[in-house]
Image (spheres, rainbow, N blue to C red):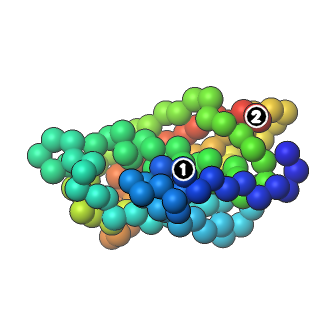
Amino acid sequence: MGNRTISDDFCFCCGRKNTKGLKLKFTYPDEGFAETECKIPDYFTGWERLTHGGLLAMLLDETMAHACISTGQLLITAELTVRYLKPVDVGESVKVKAQIMEAKSRIVETEGWIHRSDGQLIARGKARFVKA
């Protein structure tokens, strides 16, 4: 796709026009890297005010996708693996980081991490993206 800017205003994670979305803002410290921060909304409560694991997986997937977007490529998630390390309460703020680890042919391998505001690692993931 070249170095095309990719934007979707209705994306649940980063879309500005999605009234129910998270409206995440991403930064790109370097090509192949992406970062965002999020205060976990109460409506993502799983059990006993703990954040639902599906939200954490989505945050990792979206941030790893943005690491790919930072290279100007249009890629889609083919596979996602998440390792949950610590529970996180709703209402907490988290920081998510991701980077491209390897790119070959049509496949891009990424890794991502979610940390509490105190720096404690709460989840990590790996994803494989394919060129659309």
Measuring from the top left, give residue 60's x and y in whole percent: 49, 47
Q: What residue do we see at 11% from left, 46% from top? A: 48
**Which residue is situated farthest in the top direction here?**
78
11 left or right of 49 in image: right
Measuring from the top left, give residue 65's x and y in whole percent: 62, 47
For the N terminus, the image quarter is: top right
Measuring from the top left, give residue 126's x and y in whole percent: 55, 39
55 left or right of 26 in image: left
- Residue 11 numbered mark, or none: 1
Question: What SS does tag 1 mark?
Answer: loop
Of 42 and 86, the residue lying toward us:
42
Of 85 and 49, the residue lying toward us:
49
Question: What SS does tag 2 mark?
Answer: loop
Residue 114 seen from this side:
no
**Which residue is situated farthest in the right direction here?**
2
Q: Are marks 2 and 1 in contact (CB under 8 Å)?
A: no
Location of residue 35 by image quarter: bottom right
Mark 1, Cα crowd under 10 Å, few <14 / some 14-19 / many 20+, is some
Residue 56 seen from this side:
yes
Q: What residue did someone put label 2 on?
A: 132
Measuring from the top left, give residue 93's x and y in whole percent: 33, 66
Mark 2, Cα crowd under 10 Å, few <14 / some 14-19 / many 20+, is few
Give the residue type that dot 2 points to.
Ala
Location of residue 132 by image quarter: top right
Q: What residue do we see at 57% from left, 65% from top? A: 26
Q: How many marks?
A: 2
**Which residue is situated farthest in the left direction here?**
48
Query: Height in image: 2 above or below 39?
Result: above
- Alpha carbons under labels 2 and 1: distance apart: 17 Å
Of 91 and 115, the residue lying toward us:
91
